[in-house]
Image: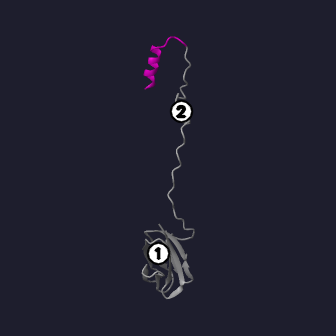
Amino acid sequence: MLWAPMLAACKATNTGAPRSPVPATQPASASARSAAPASPTPLRPQTTVVARPGVPGQIVLTPSGPRPAAITIQAGRSATWVNATGTPLRIISDEPGLFDTGDITPGESVSVTLTATGEHPWHEASDPAFAGTVTVLP
């Protein structure tokens, strides 16, 4: 109770002159608090939003083609190909040596972790028209 000793000290030195009371609901420093600048809004981390249905980072290989054909992931994350066809498929990068999934049997999936940023086109080994792109952000 810091106020009690201060009030007692004031009464001890009171000369009898009337004083204006300080309202109990508003401390004397309230006006100083309202003049303080507002704290800045915290920054939000940048996020990558993939505006397509499905699981981000996942491509479902269907008889009619990949769904979606293009995905965006962050470096160090995986791109996953799910084979929903009735035949084995092999996904390879258009960039020599970047990735090769090997055969993906029907109903199975293969994930590849990518660290190189940029756009990385890919295609099915036996059908170059069955293709897509993985964009890797830093």
Residue 89 pos. (x, y %) = 47, 84
Q: Which mark is residue 80?
A: 1
Magenta residue span: 2-17
Up/down of 35 relative to 8, above or below: below
Task: Say which label, 2 or 1, has the lower sequence index.
Answer: 2
Real-space Cα distance between discs 2 and 1?
Answer: 58 Å
Occupied quadrant, residue 12 = top left
Say which amino acid is labelled 2: Ala
Residue 66 pos. (x, y %) = 54, 79
Q: Residue furthest bottom?
A: 126
Q: Is residue 101 magenta?
A: no
The secondary element bearing badge 2 is classed as helix
Up/down of 54 relative to 89, above or below: above
Q: Residues within 10 Å of mark 2 (few under 14, many from 20)?
A: few
Depth check, front residue: 63 or 51: 51
The secondary element bearing badge 1 is classed as strand
Residue 49 pos. (x, y %) = 54, 65
Identify the residue at horizontal 43%, vertical 75% (top origin). 112
Q: Which mark is residue 32?
A: 2
